Each structure stands twice: as C-alpha cells, then as structure tokens.
Image (tube, rainbow, N blue to C red):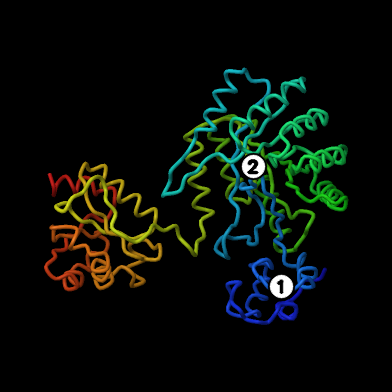
Amino acid sequence: MAKLTGLQIQKLLPKTNCKECGSNTCLAFAMKLASKKADLADCPYASDEAKQVLGAASEAPVKGVAFGKDKTVKVGEETCFYRHEKTFVNQTALAININDSASTAEIDALIDEIKNYELDRVGELLGIEMVAVTQTGDSVESFVALAEKVWSKTGCPLILRSDDVEALTAAAMAVKGSNSLLVAATSENWEAVVKVAQDCGHAVVATAPELDQLVKLTADIKAAGFNDLVIQLQTKSLSERFQVNSMTRKAALKDSYKPLGYATLAFIEHEDSLMAASVTAITEITKYGGICVLPEFNKAQLATLMALRQNIYTDPQKPIQVEPKIYPVGEPDENSPVFITTNFSLTYFIVSGEIENSGISAWLLVPECEGMSVLTAWAAGKFSGATIGKFTREVELEAKVKSREIIIPGYVAQISGELEESMPGWKVIVGPQEAGDLESFVKARFA
C-alpha cells in the first residue's frame, strides 16, 4: 500500500475533534498517524472502514511481539531512528543463557540468581526479563526437563534454542502458555517450527546467513499466515553487528521495508573476556537490539547494562521524576536540617543518598521542576527563590520544623537573596555544588 498523507488519513477519521486521542484535532492526529508517531487504536471512534484501510498503513514499522504468561515483556513497536525524535518504545530485553549440559547444582544456583536478582535504580526496580534454554547435549528429555524447570521456578518467558526440531517441538509443548520464543526457523525447517509455535502460542526467531535470504524467509513465513517473528542477524564481528543492526532498523523505519521490520535477537557468546562480552551487549542495547542474551550471570555486568538501558529508554521529553513533596531522610524530627533539590529522579536519589551517607537525619524539600536537573530548572525559571518560597508554603514546611535554615545547591547560590525575601525569617545556606561533597559539608557544619 502506498504511504498515505495526513490529509488522506484525516478523511477516514470521525472528524469530531474530541481530543480523546491526545491530539487537539483529528487533523493533528492524522499527521501523527502519517509519521507513525501514533496508533490508530488511540482513536476510540475509528470506523471499521478506517481500521481496515489504515490498519497496515499506521502500524509500527517494527513489529511488536509480547512474551510471558501475561505478555508483559514486549519488544519491537519502534517508530524512530534516534531517541530525540520521539522516544524508543520497548527496551532491549536482557536474558541469561542456561545450557542443558550444565550440572544440576550449577543450573539450580543460576535459576536462584536469576529469580532473585533485582536492581533498584532511581526508584525503578529492574530485573532479568527472559531466560534462554540452550540444547548442547543429545538428550531431548534433558532439554525438555530444563525448560519446564526454568519456567516453573522463574516465571520468565523462555528462549528455547535447539537445532533439533524434535527437541524444540517437545520443549515448546512442555511450556505451552508461556508465550516464549523458539530459536530458530531457517529456510529448511521453518514450516515445522512455525506449526508448533502456532499450536503452542509461541513466537519464532527467523535466521539466515545472509540478509537477502532472511528477507525471503520472513516474507515466506508471513505469507503463510504467521507474523509473530523476531529476527537473528548472523554477523562475524562487532563492526559488522553495528552496521547490520543499523541498516536493518533504517530499512524498517525509513523505507517501511516490512521483511526486515522485526525486533532482533542476539546471543552474546564466543567472547574472550567479560569486557568484550559487555562491549558487544552495549552495542546491542545502543543499536536497536530487541533481545540480548548474556552467556553468564554477572551482577556487575547486569548493573552496568541495565543502567545504560534505563538511560537510553527514558523518554528524553519526559525525564524520570519523583513526586514533589517533603521527603524524610533517615528519621528526622522538628529540629533536623532542611535541604532542597529538584524532582529529577536521578538528582533526588543521589542527593538523598549522600545525606544518608553523612550519618544525619534531615528533611529534603523537592519542589515541582518538571523533572529537570538543578541548573536546567534554574535556567528555565522552575527553581527560583519565588517558586521555592511558594512551594514551602504549599507544603506547610514551617509547621513541620523549628529550624529556620534551608540549604540550597551551590550551583544556584545566586537565588539565596531572592529566597530569603520569599521566606521571611529564614536563613539560606549555600551548600556544595556537587552532591559528592555533601557528606563532608554535613560533617563540617553539623558535627
């Protein structure tokens, strides 16, 4: 189907300008549909004709696939090449690989680590989304037993990998209902793999040595009526991986090339060091990887990758924020000191952590700054003496504390005079510029 313009799309919309889609007018919504920055499902009054005509034209250029019993792990559905254009949608899923040739003790220990791993970063709890189960031995029974065990103990959707279609079929049937992923459909076996995936409700990975072969394979599978696909790009070096990942995403987004419009899967293996494996995983996360399977469980590596992923997949137009209010740090009372910072989540957690590390209890005042950092909020007029003073009255700060001193970040020392005017009877103390110096500042002033 030829690409429709915003005006052509608007003719198929109800033209009520109800604003329920989030746009001010149907024309504005049509323009978003034309640029693939909106979904037709956002319009509650779209007619059946519009759904039929616009369904394919407005669908995300990268096919979305959901995994897990409740289908909470999602990949694909991307609409932009660079995150500042809008935002990336579904973050790269991180998985840990388990081989069926490992000992029972090794498998049990790894399952416990995966199940219990949790990283709390800037108020968001992060964990491992998927587990890969790889057949490296000859026993179908061992492979199936491992798949059942991992699914029952972790509850994570699985990535079942085997070159033996019989083993893959048996494992897929054993975890039916898990909405897992079968690796892999090739030009030789895709009909058998797709059939078991359809019967058991799983998605399929399609792979081929060359891109043109992969294009033919995905087209054949889709023509057969199955489209819950993920693709595995076979590359031989880090530079080739970088290049092919970018080419594939560009073809899907810029050229609407459907045969490559799928999320990708990459197994990180055959690396000669933890550093090399991490660099490859970082390339996957930063260059459009859909699912990244790590060869081992390593907390330091996971923390690094998850922090990177969180930064990349945060909407650049909507920073992570905490609720504007007065936060207790430790067990403060009415005589405890009062600090202030912005409601940018990362700033809040760093500042509160440094105050806690100093060994004192305090109140941390966090006004509404639209998720901006201190200097950005000050430059935008969101973190001024007048706005802070107004906020302290709204939260009734004076009723909570007897202290009449408030400590502001050193980077905005210039607001101290205005803040004292806005808060009569209060003394403004200029703290350090960097949060890392708060501990020494506190010990010097409150020791």
Residue at 21%, 46% in the rendered image:
361
- Closer to the camera, 145 or 61? 145
Q: Quick one: SS at disc 1?
A: loop
Residue at 54%, 33% in the rendered image:
115
- Which residue is label 2 attached to? 238
Q: Quick one: SS at disc 2?
A: helix
Q: Dot 2: within a 10 Å radius of its alpha carbon, few (fewer than 14), some, or many (20 or more) residues? A: some
- The amino acid marked with disc number 2 is Leu
- Closer to the camera, 413 or 384? 384
Q: Any mark on residue 46, and which?
A: 1
Q: Position of residue 265 (x, y in %)?
A: 68, 43
The residues tagged by marks 2 and 1 sit, at their Cα atoms, a distance apart of 45 Å
Earlier sequence position, callout 2 versus callout 1:
1
Residue 334 sits above or below residue 3 on the image: above
Q: To which quarter of the image does residue 26 belong?
A: bottom right
Q: Position of residue 78 (x, y in %)?
A: 65, 58
Q: Any mark on residue 104, and which?
A: none
> 79 left or right of 193?
left
